[in-house]
Image: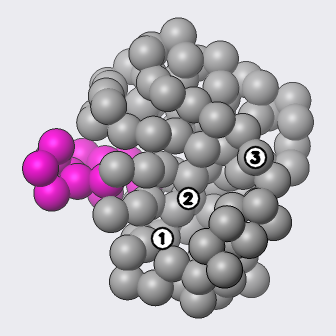
């Protein structure tokens, strides 16, 4: 299962179209924390796509670094806010997460 964290309805629609039922979407940090809190290794997420703007991505990255839900999950930051994305990547990598950065267009393109 894939968790996609982004508050933009246009991006959410593109992801639903591209990934279908394999994606859960959180439009806020509160929803993302809820999903991550109830998930477990066997039935949880394999990949988390994070945005910075609009969803307090830096706060979510800090929460993940502190609480380490699903420490083996792959994290992909798709934010166009480069400074924010770098900050998120640093916090998550310091906590041991496998983190990549990519453009949103590449995320959707990769599943076409």
The residue to which callout 1 is attached is 25
**Residue 40 located within the stretch drawn in magenta:** yes
The residue closer to the viewer here, 48 or 29, is 48
Q: Please give the residue where the numbered disc 3 appears in the rendered image.
A: 102
Q: Earlier in the sequence, mark 1 or mark 2?
A: 2
Quadrant in which the C terminus appears: bottom right
Q: Quadrant of residue 16?
A: bottom right
Q: Residue furthest left?
A: 42
**Crowding at label 2, few (<14), some or many (≥20) Cα neighbours within 10 Å?**
many
Q: Is residue 57 left or right of residue 84?
A: left
Q: Earlier in the sequence, mark 2 or mark 3?
A: 2
What whole-number distance in Å separates the C-alpha atoms at marks 2 and 3?
14 Å
Q: Is residue 9 visible?
A: no
Judging by the rendered image, the residue that carries numbered circle 2 is: 5
Q: Secondary structure at mark 3?
A: loop
Give the class, few, some or many, for how many residues have Cα within 10 Å of label 3's Cα (few <14, many ≥20): some
Q: Residues within 10 Å of mark 1 (few under 14, many from 20)?
A: many
Residues at circles 1 and 2 in contact by the CB criterion of under 8 Å: yes
Q: Position of residue 48 (x, y in %)?
A: 47, 50
* Sooner in the amino-acid sequence: mark 3 or mark 1: 1
Which mark identifies residue 50? none
What segment is highlighted magenta in the picture?
Answer: 32-45
């Amino acid at each position: 299962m894939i968790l996609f964290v982004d508050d933009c309805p246009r991006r959410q629609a593109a992801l639903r179209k591209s990934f279908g039922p394999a994606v859960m979407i959180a439009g806020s940090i509160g929803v993302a924390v809820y999903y991550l809190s109830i998930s477990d290794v066997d039935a949880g997420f394999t990949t988390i796509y994070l945005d910075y703007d609009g969803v307090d991505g830096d706060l979510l990255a800090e929460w993940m670094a502190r609480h380490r839900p699903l420490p083996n999950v792959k994290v992909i930051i798709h934010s166009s806010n480069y400074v924010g994305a770098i900050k998120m990547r640093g916090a998550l990598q310091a906590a041991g997460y496998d983190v990549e950065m990519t453009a949103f267009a590449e995320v959707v393109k990769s599943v076409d």
